[in-house]
Image (cartoon, grey):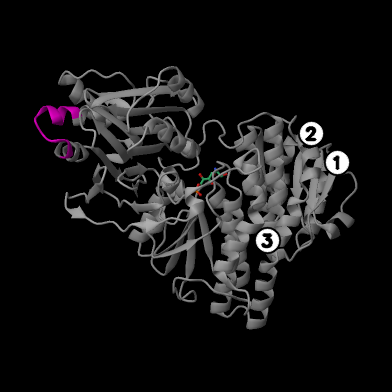
Amino acid sequence: MCGIIGVVGNSPVTPRLLESLKRLEYRGYDSAGVASLENGRLDRRRAAGKIKALEEVLEADSLPGQVGIGHTRWATHGAPTTRNAHPHRAGPVAVVHNGIIENFAELKAELIAAGRRFESDTDTEVIAHLIAAELGTGLDPAAAFKATLDRLEGAFALAVLIEGEEDLMLGARRGSPLVLGYGEGEMFLGSDALAVGPFTRKIAYLDEGDWVVLHHASAQVFDATGRPVKRAIVEVSASAALVEKGNYRHFMEKEIHDQPEGCQHTIAAYVDPLASVAAIPGGLDLASFERIQVVACGTSYIAGILGKYLIEQLADLPVDVEIASEFRYRSPAVRAGTLAIAMSQSGETADTLAAFRLCKARGMTLAAVVNAQGSTIAREADVVWPIHCGVEIGVASTKAFTAQVSLLTALAIAIAKARGTIDAKEEQRLVKALLEAPRLIGEAIGLEDAVRKVAVEIAKARDVLYLGRGPMSALALEGALKLKEISYIHAEGYAAGELKHGPIALVDEATPIIILAPFDSYYEKSASNMSEVMARGGPVVFITDPEGAKHAPAGARVVMTAPPCDPLIAPLVMSAPIQLLAYHVAVLKGADVDQPRNLAKSVTVE
Ligand code: AGP
């Protein structure tokens, strides 16, 4: 939920911290701050609001030094004010933190009773005071830090400076990601590869419980027991280190347009295009499972629902898809013999991780479908299936969604072949259809001008309904989620067959209804639903394909025609218009498309 950066450097640190924080802003943007050491003196600057506010503070009152830490915040404890902005300080200690300290209240009471004075409402400030108190007993910085870590309960990624120690930085990770960056005579700490990307591509992912002592020329990693350990140094790709908007106004716009390429990379990793067969890496015997259990949140959960439709239809294998925050607490009747699939773009979503760990505890085989390959969920899986769509910055997920669905489509084909529910000929036909997806997604993006026009009307609405049947019912959920999370217009996605069981009461002139209906086996029913809502004055936007447009009931306000495609990839092709619709409505409403209010890209707290 927050982004942290630390630099033990040889050049002015503030510009470097700001550059990194701008890359981390997608993780949270309620407030930001930096601290540095200059001739041993510790100082800090903070500001409520986005990085820009902090830049203005620094323009007016610069911060010298070559060693520093920075933080961009998504508020958990304490309002998003300057007073609650990180870095938090207690005497000679400054700390930045991503996560939640669950026992902070008792620790705070203990420290106050010992005479320490707090200035913020945050849990994080407790950490600074604990380290300062341990230093006060005569412990050296590393020992004081370790003693503090042993007192903390909850999740944290930390970077800490100590006044007077210009060749030292302390870091730790438990439940929130942290990477170590290796420079030339410099060392870095960051929430992810992107954070340290401007400085180095040589990184090491810290493990759960690791803590680290950094100097300019070295870093010593320790495990939770205090034993020195080595963590592999890897070279991350340029894309992970360098993400720009190019000629687009927003990352989301760029990521929507990147989907043909993104899905191409995904599909290429899971099919053999020459032999036209599905080829799922990881060595699992896909015919050996009695069930599949998908756990995920948000858009990733919706991708999982699409996976269910495809795998059950093609492979006749039961698939349960559950919202992770429900699954993890409800004592599910699940057991071994099941393949558990965690769907997570970030690979750090706390609820999905917890649900995944419950699946492990129940003896399931774990597969992680992630974009961030070094993420916690990936590192706890038996098999990792990366979606290879490149770093996704926009908080509203688009290219990761279609990449997830592309992967699940290839997986459905592979499972069906392994279980013998399709023969080699059908497998080839389906793989060929999947290989068409990138081109057809590109054609569907060509609907953008028509979408822009529809967006003008939708932007005026207070409520919007999305309807679909079969896989399109899942896409209706996704269309509604996209619209509400970036334009702040209330929207609901419904299975069109459910309309008469309540939602039709919502239909009136002022409530646009977006109906998703390619000319497939569900089409006739969807067309009837369309007539039902139009008979009640509901303004319908009908998104279909050329055959569906030909048979569409008269009266729709707009009929948008996506390119014709095999039903197998209709969810992929129909995603583009609903993503573009949400995007253009949000732009018309002047919303903050890449960083919608109250949201963050990775929900690493419960
Ligand atoms: C999607 O547009 C949202 N930003 C959100 O629902 C997201 O999909 C969800 O938080 C899950 O994130 P993950 O894929 O990183 O686990």
Could you say which quadrant of the image residue 491 lies in? top right
**Residue at position x 18%, y 25% from top?**
110
- Sequence-first tag of 1 and 3: 3
Q: Position of residue 60 (x, y in %)?
A: 45, 17
Q: Position of residue 308 (x, y in %)?
A: 58, 61
Work out whether 24 lies above or below 42.
Answer: below
Q: Nearer the viewer, mark 1 or mark 3?
A: 3
Observer able to see residue 431: yes
> Are the residues tagged 1 and 2 within 8 Å (C-beta)?
yes
Q: Which residues are magenta?
A: 132-142
Q: Which residue is mark 1?
A: 557
- The answer for how far apart the CA atoms under marks 1 and 3 are is 29 Å
- The label number, if any, that marks residue 438 in the structure image: 3
- Sequence-first tag of 1 and 2: 2
> Are the residues tagged 1 and 3 within 8 Å (C-beta)?
no
* For residue 462, side relative to residue 103 (left or right): right
Circle 1: residue type: Arg
**Residue at position x 68%, y 40% from top?**
582
Q: Position of residue 278 (x, y in %)?
A: 58, 74
Q: Which residue is mark 2?
A: 457
Work out whether 55 lies above or below 288.
Answer: above
**Residue at position x 48%, y 21% from top?**
56
Could you say which quadrant of the image residue 572 lies in? bottom right
Q: Position of residue 277 (x, y in %)?
A: 60, 77
Q: Nearer the viewer, mark 2 or mark 3?
A: 3
Work out whether 194 lies above or below 43.
Answer: below
Circle 2: residue type: Glu
Observer able to see residue 99: no
Prevalent SS, magenta region: helix
Magenta span includes 147: no
Magenta span includes 140: yes
